[in-house]
Image: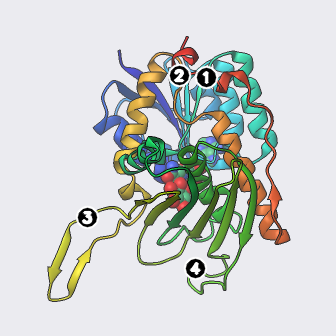
Amino acid sequence: MTLAVGVIGTGMIGQDHIRRLTKVLSGVEVVAVNDIDSKRAAATAPAGAKVYESAQALINSNSVAAVVICSWGPAHEEQLLDCVAAGKPVFCEKPMVTSEAAALKVMEAETAFGRRLVQVGFMRRFDADYRRLKRTIDGGTLGTPLMYRSVHRNASVPPGLYTSDMPLNDTMVHDADISRWLLDDEIVGVEVRMPRKSSVGGELRDPHLVLLHMGQGAIVSVEISVNIAYGYDIRGEVSCERGVAELPNRPATVISDIHGIRQAIPEDWRERFIEAYDQEFREWIVAAGEGTSTGPSAWDGYAATLAADAALRAAQSGTRQVVKMIEKPALYRRSVAQAAE
Ligand code: NAD
Ligand code: ISE
């Protein structure tokens, strides 16, 4: 059966997801789109898709079985709550929401509904390199993980739209999530250090060095650079008791010529994570077809939101900030098989 999907937010990633849902993946059809910029929605709607004037009308439409939210972070809360109220599986781009209170509301609504509906767009969990890294750590031959170094460099971010909080509450959330997932642990404390400011990127404060203290004692260091100019560079290295496992920048063809030996660097996240986004949606389409969601949950969105909030406080205060989570609701403790029941 084909999953009828409505997409809210038809900007950069909305258009990229519409492309993969219409041209790459099977078992899915984009039947509806919405954007506060209705001209953009109309210009990007795939053939046959209806353009809705409001996100709520799209969510409540009988012709939409599942929803993909690609609007800006602050708009996610209301749209997620409307999806849960309508009982529709929803894929929501990160950040799930932008405040702890909003994350709690989403979890409360989903818990009251009684089945997982929300999947958050933490695509690194679907990337083959990250999955290999996790299998290596979980295999146990290297011993217990002690430290993880996460490097997150963007060539540039859209000037103006990308504000000074965003390196920590929009970009760093990926590193917070992947650290929790790789180390199978929760973040309990956050510190932020800021080296001298890069002159690239105007007024924006960049880069940041973030330390995530994990519950079982591992420490994660995260470099967030959002205007590094040369390309999109994502790396990771886990130091364990008896060895080190490394996630290199994307392997690419090695070219040797008169200029030397070189490899191309991805331009941005669309190129680096193209297969990860495809896989993320492949798995979501199957789960959504069964009326649920199985990937990164609202609990994971909540954990990343708390880490981002703590990082913002740590950057302001210069001190280590505590992260205190509520007890994990039963819904998010269930296995995938139980959650689908
Ligand atoms: P963008 O500015 O290019 O597009 C956002 C679109 O949402 C715009 O067209 C805007 O008009 C629309 N919009 C905003 N508020 C809306 C609302 N209330 N209702 C309907 N439409 C609304 O931004 P983007 O880069 O596409 O980012 C969108 C979201 O995706 C953000 O949350 C961002 O953090 C996330 N994102 C995730 C990844 C990833 O790697 N997972 C990559 C890029 C962006
Ligand atoms: C963007 O929104 C993403 O999610 C990318 O994956 C991230 O690398 C980038 O910094 C964000 O702006």
Secondary structure beneath disc 4? loop
Task: State which mark lies toward you, 2 or 1.
Answer: 2
Mark 1, residue position: 116
Which part of the image, by quadrant, shows the C terminus?
top right
Mark 3, residue position: 252
Disc 3 CB within 8 Å of nearest ligand 2 atom: no
Q: Are marks 3 and 1 in contact (CB under 8 Å)?
A: no
Disc 1 CB within 8 Å of nearest ligand 1 atom: no
Residue 254 position (above or below residue 83): below
Task: State which mark lies toward you, 1 or 4.
Answer: 1
Q: Are marks 4 and 3 in contact (CB under 8 Å)?
A: no
Amino acid type at circle 2 is: Val
Mark 4, residue position: 201
Q: Are marks 2 and 3 in contact (CB under 8 Å)?
A: no
Q: CA distance from mark 4 to mark 3?
A: 28 Å
Q: Are marks 2 and 4 in contact (CB under 8 Å)?
A: no
Pick whichever of labels 3 and 1 is earlier in the sequence. 1
Residue lying at the far front in this picture: please name it. 242
